[in-house]
Image (cartoon, rainbow, N blue to C red):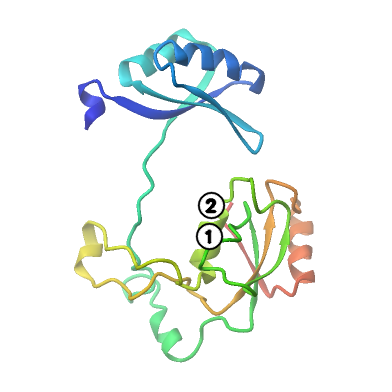
Amino acid sequence: PSWASGGAIPVHIWAFDKDLTDRVLSAARADDPDAARVDDAGNLYVSASLPLADIQSLVKSEPAVQYVEIVRPKVLLNDLVALPQICNVEPEWTAGWNGAGVIVGHNDSGVDLTHPDFPTGVIVATNGKMSKTDNGHGTHTAGSVLGRGLANSSPANTSGCGDQYSPESTVRGMAYGADIATNNIFSGGATGDSSMMQWGVQQGAALSTNSW
């Protein structure tokens, strides 16, 4: 990899306290002038690209640094979960069971309301922020449950056991006929165990998914 020969590594750097973020930013800019302070829905960190030696030096010399996280590129993975070797959901689909008529309560970080896998009518209720917030994980978990498979073509299988099987014709949720009531527990939605479940039931949810 490029970092082994001194190449820059994209990283996010957190301070021990939000008030120390600018101090960490100043230290990071000594090696990366383009380092930036990021406010992700109140979650403050520094985004930078630094060689490994500079990361090590920053951690040792700047006591305000709490931890450093490598920013790994997002890639499409395989779509094998429905196959017999994993969840074996295909026989249920063939029998006509796809979740139609069921509302799933979803407690996570919200959902991207513009995502093509959630067309009009699929999201029956929302609680908390759904835009201008970090809804990536919530969108992922909602799609795993009931995404319609309407986005672009399915990703190719990845290395390992995935290459032994043909991919599905589309990537969709295990209960791709169900609907969803989504509650952003991190930004404006119900946060208590009881309150989040009660909100879901009030929207008609028969079960809930909690992957936070």
Q: Amino acid at mark 1?
A: Thr
Residue 68 horizontal/vertical position (percent): 45, 26
Residue farthest to the top?
61
State the CA–CA distance, disc 2 to disc 1.
6 Å
Q: Look at the image and tell me in which quarter the N terminus lies.
A: top left
24 sits to left or right of 199: left
Residue 57 horizontal/vertical position (percent): 38, 11
Q: Is residue 66 above or below residue 195?
A: above
Q: Is residue 35 above or below residue 153?
A: above
The numbered disc on residue 119 is none
Q: Nearer the viewer, residue 162 or 140?
A: 140
Label 2 close to label 1 by CB (< 8 Å):
yes
Residue 197 horizontal/vertical position (percent): 74, 63
Task: Tell me the residue that label 1 is attached to.
Answer: 141
Q: Residues within 10 Å of mark 2 (few under 14, many from 20)?
A: some
103 sits to left or right of 60: right
The local secondary structure at tag 1 comes to helix
The local secondary structure at tag 2 comes to helix
Figure label count: 2
Task: Tell me the residue that label 2 is attached to.
Answer: 137
Q: Amino acid at mark 2?
A: His
